[in-house]
Image (cartoon, rainbow, N blue to C red):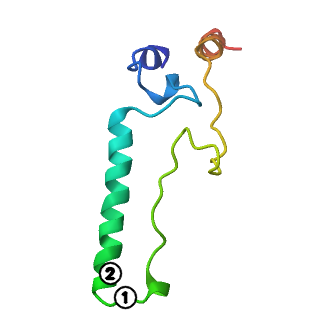
Amino acid sequence: MLALVRGLPSDALVWANESSSWSMQLELSAVSVELLHAVCRLLMQQGGAKRARLPEPLRIPRPTDSTMTRRPSRPSFDPDKFTAYLQRLEAGQ
C-alpha cells in the first residue's frame, strides 16, 4: 500500500495543500461548465420558461473564494504517520 501511495503523481490530491489554487485546466473546465449552464438558461428562457422555473445561475466555488462557504476540509494526509501505521501492522501490533 505504501508503495502505491508513494508512486502517486505529484499533482494527486493526497499531496495537495488545502489552500492551493487550481490549475489552469481545472479553472477553464469550471468556466466552461458555468458558460454551458448559462447557455442552457438562455435557451430555456427563449423556450418560454418562467423566471421562477429557471435554475439559479451556476457558480462553481473556487479554492480562493473566501466568501463562499466551503465543505468541511478532508483530513490531512501525513505520509510519515501512514508509514508508521503500516509498519505497526506488519509487526502485528
* Element type where label 2 sits in the image: helix
Q: Residues within 10 Å of mark 2 (few under 14, many from 20)?
A: some
Horizontal side of 46 relative to 75 (left or right) equals left
Q: Which disc is residue 44 wearing?
A: 2
Q: Position of residue 5 (x, y in %)?
A: 46, 19
Position of 28 relative to 75 (above/below): below
In the displayed structure, 18 sits above or below 2; it is: below
Residue at figure coordinates x 30%, y 68% from the top left: 39
Tell me the residue at 39%/15% (across/down). Answer: 7
Closest to the observer, 89 or 25: 25
Q: Residue at x 62, y 18 (%)?
A: 78
| Kind of residue indicated by mark 2 | Met
Q: Quadrant of residue 18?
A: top right
Please give left or right for residue 64 compared with residue 28 in the image. right
Q: Which quarter of the rendered picture does the C terminus lie within?
A: top right
Whether tag 1 and tag 2 are in contact, CB under 8 A, the answer is yes
Quarter occupied by residue 23: top left
Q: Give the residue displayed 48% in from the left and 30% down from the top.
A: 13
N-terminal-most mark, 1 or 2: 2
Q: Which residue matches tag 1?
A: 49
Q: Report crowding for label 1: few under 14, some 14 to 19, many 20 or more residues within 10 A (C-alpha).
A: few
Q: Nearer the viewer, residue 1 or 93?
A: 1
Residue 26, placed above or below residue 71: above
Number of labels in the image equals 2
Is label 1 in a helix, a strand or a loop?
loop
Considering depth in this image, is 88 or 44 the residue closer to the camera?
A: 44
Q: What amino acid is found at the position of numbered circle 1 in the picture?
A: Ala
Residue 55 image position (x, y, % from top left): 45, 75
3D distance between C-alphas at marks 1 and 2: 6 Å
